[in-house]
Every structure is written in C-alpha cells, then in structure tokens.
Amino acid sequence: MKEKVEKALEKVRPHLQADGGDVELVDVTEDGTVKLRLKGACGSCPMAAMTLQHGVSRILKQEVPEIKKIEAVD
C-alpha cells in the first residue's frame, strides 16, 4: 500500500509545491493509517489542517481506498 500512497502523493505535490510547500510520507501502518508531514510553507500555514483534511486526504482516499485514516505528524 505504501507504493500506492506515494504514487497518489505525486498527484498532490505539484499543488503544494506551487505554494512553497510539500508533503512527506512518514509511515503507512498495517491498520491502514497513513502518517504525513507537511513541509515548507505548508508546515507553518494556519490552513494546513484544512489542506490536509480536504485536499490531500480526499485525493489519497480516492486513489487508495484501503486507507482508513490520515494523520499529520510533526
């Protein structure tokens, strides 16, 4: 599943990078939890939680339906 998540993140990255940010895959657990770290401008943006929840999560779950949960980590 980790490879599928990485592939899906490649679709998201250009949008984040256009705003000076990025996303890093930290871990994919056996229970289907994906742990991500927002980097650059996204890491310090007050809207980061919204970006993760409504942008990144939506696309990842659409591309990789096996995902149960997405968490941001520091």
Image (tube, grey):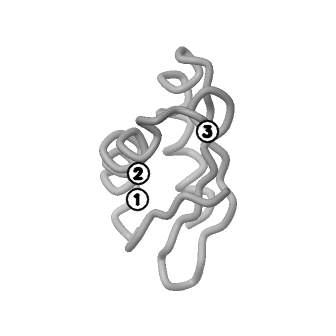
Q: Mark 2 — residue? A: 60
Residue 20: x, y in percent?
Answer: 61, 19
Q: Is residue 21 above or below residue 59?
A: above
Q: Is residue 60 left or right of residue 31?
A: left
Q: Are marks 2 and 1 in contact (CB under 8 Å)?
A: yes
| x 60%, y 35%: residue | 44
| x 48%, y 76%: residue | 32
- Which mark sits nearer the N-terminus, 2 or 3? 3
Q: Secondary structure at mark 1?
A: loop
- Numbered circle sitting on residue 43: 3
Residue 64: x, y in percent?
Answer: 40, 59
Q: Secondary structure at mark 2?
A: helix
Q: Secondary structure at mark 3?
A: helix
- What amino acid is at disc 3? Gly
Q: Is residue 5 left or right of residue 70?
A: right
| x 56%, y 45%: residue | 7
Residue nearest the viewer, comparing 2 with 20: 20
